[in-house]
Amino acid sequence: MSASRAAGRGRFITLEGGEGAGKSTQAHLLAEHIRSLGHECVVTREPGGSSVAEALREAILSGVAAPLGPSAETVLFAAARIDHVAQTILPALARGAFVVCDRFTDSTRVYQGALGKVDPALIRTLEDIAAGQCRPDLTLILDLPAKTGLARAAARRAQQAADRFEAEGLAFHEGLRTAFLDIAASEPGRCKVVDAAKGPDEVARAILSAVEARLGPLAAKADAS
C-alpha cells in the first residue's frame, strides 16, 4: 500500500513522459484546479524538490556526472530522491495534501534502466531505499511522438543549451517513449496514458478526467470555519 493511501494521508500523483511532453505545464494546471477546490496541493519535481536534491539536479542535468556512467547517475538520482521524499513529499502527504510530482521513479526505470542498461536489481534496490513505501497513487504518462517532443523542448529553451538528456539523439528519445508505454502496459492499475500531442487545455481536461476516474471526484473542500 502506498504511503498516501494510509488513513488520513493525501494523494500522490506523478507525471511521466519524454522531453517536451508538457509535464511541468500540466502539473501546475492540475494543481491550480485542485487548489481552486480548497485543497492543499504541493507541486514538485525530480531531480529536485528539496534543497539537497536541487543541488544534485545541477550536477546531473549539466552532464558533469555523465562520465561516471549510468550506474553512478542512478545513485545520484537515488540520493536526491531520499531527501526529496523525506523533506517534501512525505510531510505534505502527512498533512493530507495532494502532491503532484513532475517525474519520479518511473523516469529512473526508463532513462537509467531501459536506456542506460543499469542492472534492474540495482534500480529496484535503490528505489526501495529512496522511495520506501512512498509510491504514487496515480501515474499519468504523457505520450507524444519523440520528434514532436524534441521540437517542443527546443522551442521552450530558445537559445539555452540542451540539458544532459535533451541532447541525446532521436533514437534515444524514441526508446524512452517505448519504455514509458511498456511501464503503463505492465501497471495499468497505477498508470494512465494521456495523449500529449493535443493542445494544453485538452490535455488538462483528459488529465482531470483520469484523476477523477482513478481517485474519485475532486469535490470542493468544506470550509472549516
Image (cartoon, rainbow, N blue to C red):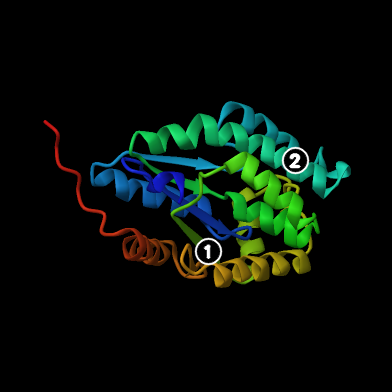
Crowding at mark 1 (Cα within 10 Å: few <14, some 14-19, many 20+) = many
Crowding at mark 2 (Cα within 10 Å: few <14, some 14-19, many 20+) = some
The secondary element bearing badge 2 is classed as: helix
Q: Nearer the viewer, residue 172 or 89?
A: 89
- Furthest-right residue in view? 67
Count of numbered tags: 2
Quarter-of-image position of residue 209: bottom left
Q: Nearer the viewer, residue 148 or 144?
A: 144
Q: Earlier in the sequence, mark 2 or mark 1?
A: 2
Residue that mark 2 sits on = 75
Q: Amino acid at mark 1?
A: Leu
Residue 134, labelled with which disc? Answer: none
Work out whether 147 lies above or below 59.
below
Q: Amino acid at mark 2?
A: Val
Q: Residue at x 35, y 41 (%)?
A: 9
- x and y percent of residue 57 in the render? 67, 37
Quadrant showing the C terminus: top left
- x and y percent of residue 104 in the render? 58, 49
Work out whether 42 lies above or below 140.
above
Q: Residue at x 79, y 57 (%)?
A: 116
- Furthest-left residue in view? 225
Q: CA distance from mark 2 to mark 1?
A: 26 Å
Q: Residue at x 81, y 47 (%)?
A: 71
Residue 197 left/right relative to 176: left
- x and y percent of residue 177 in the render? 65, 68
The secondary element bearing badge 1 is classed as: strand
Q: Residue at x 36, y 63 (%)?
A: 214
Residue 57 shows in this picture: no
Residue that mark 1 sits on = 142
Q: Nearer the viewer, mark 2 or mark 1?
A: 2
Callout 2 touching callout 1 (CB < 8 Å) = no
